């Protein structure tokens, strides 16, 4: 599931995930770094409360996540996970393509259905600082890998899913 910011990806992905058999895992990747991030995470947790998801906070090291039983997992979102893994506490850049790819494959082996939310980045043509450019290149590389690997790829535009590959259930 890809698309621009506030395109409706999360809402659509949640509805899609709940259409598959339980258990439903919501793997949240936002790292809590300040009060505002804590508020956002708390608000999102409250929005999902009673919605049928078991929320697992996993901002990094996806390769260490173990699900209780096979089911449907929604990873929200690949962009946060990539940034969390790519930049260390001092802001140094690490090449984490293999680590993230392995983590996603590790998660996929545990699921009956896996939905990954990501963002469309890099198509605006604006020059960014070197660190941001490296992030855009890495996320684009991971997105291409997932699009080749997975059966269904959809882009959300103004809340409307556009199939790029495969068929939605």
Image (spheres, rainbow, N blue to C red):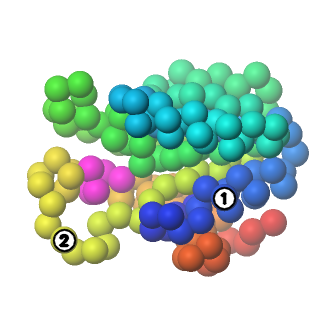
Q: Is residue 44 rendered magenta in the image?
A: no
Task: Check residue 126 in the rendering and tell me which mark sits there, or answer none.
Answer: 2
Magenta span main SS: helix
Residue at 36% in and 34% down: 84
> As displayed, is residue 129 above or below residue 47?
below
Q: Position of residue 18 (x, y in %)?
A: 81, 50
> As displayed, is residue 105 above or below residue 14?
above
Residue at 74% in and 31% down: 54
Q: Look at the image and tell me whether residue 103 can be seen.
A: no
Circle 2: is it few (<14), some (14-19), or many (20+) Cα within 10 Å? Answer: few
Q: Position of residue 127 (x, y in %)?
A: 14, 67
Helix or strand or loop: what does disc 2 sit on? loop
Q: How many marks?
A: 2
Residue at 66% in and 58% down: 11
40 sits left or right of 55 in the view: left
* Residue receiving disc 1: 11
Residue closer to the observer: 35 or 160: 35
Quadrant of res 87: top left
Quadrant of res 99: top left
Q: Position of residue 139 (x, y in %)?
A: 36, 53
CB of mark 2 within 8 Å of CB of mark 1?
no
- Highlighted magenta segment, given as a residue range: 135-139
115 sits left or right of 96 in the view: right
Residue closer to the observer: 77 or 107: 77
């Amino acid at each position: 599931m890809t698309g621009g910011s506030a395109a409706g990806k999360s809402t659509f992905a949640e509805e899609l995930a709940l259409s598959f058999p339980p258990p439903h895992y919501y793997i949240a990747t936002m790292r809590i770094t300040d009060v505002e991030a804590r508020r956002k995470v708390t608000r999102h947790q409250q929005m999902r409360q009673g919605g049928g998801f078991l929320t697992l906070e996993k901002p990094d090291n996806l390769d260490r996540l173990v699900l209780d039983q096979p089911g449907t997992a929604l990873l929200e979102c690949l962009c946060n996970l990539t940034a969390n893994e790519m930049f260390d506490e001092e802001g140094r850049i690490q090449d984490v393509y293999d680590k993230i790819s392995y983590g996603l494959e590790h998660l996929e082996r545990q699921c009956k259905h896996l939905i990954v939310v990501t963002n469309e980045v890099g198509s605006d043509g604006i020059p960014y600082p070197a660190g941001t450019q490296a992030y855009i290149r890495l996320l684009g590389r991971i997105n291409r890998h997932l699009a080749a690997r997975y059966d269904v790829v959809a882009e959300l535009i103004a809340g409307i899913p556009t199939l790029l590959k495969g068929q939605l259930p």
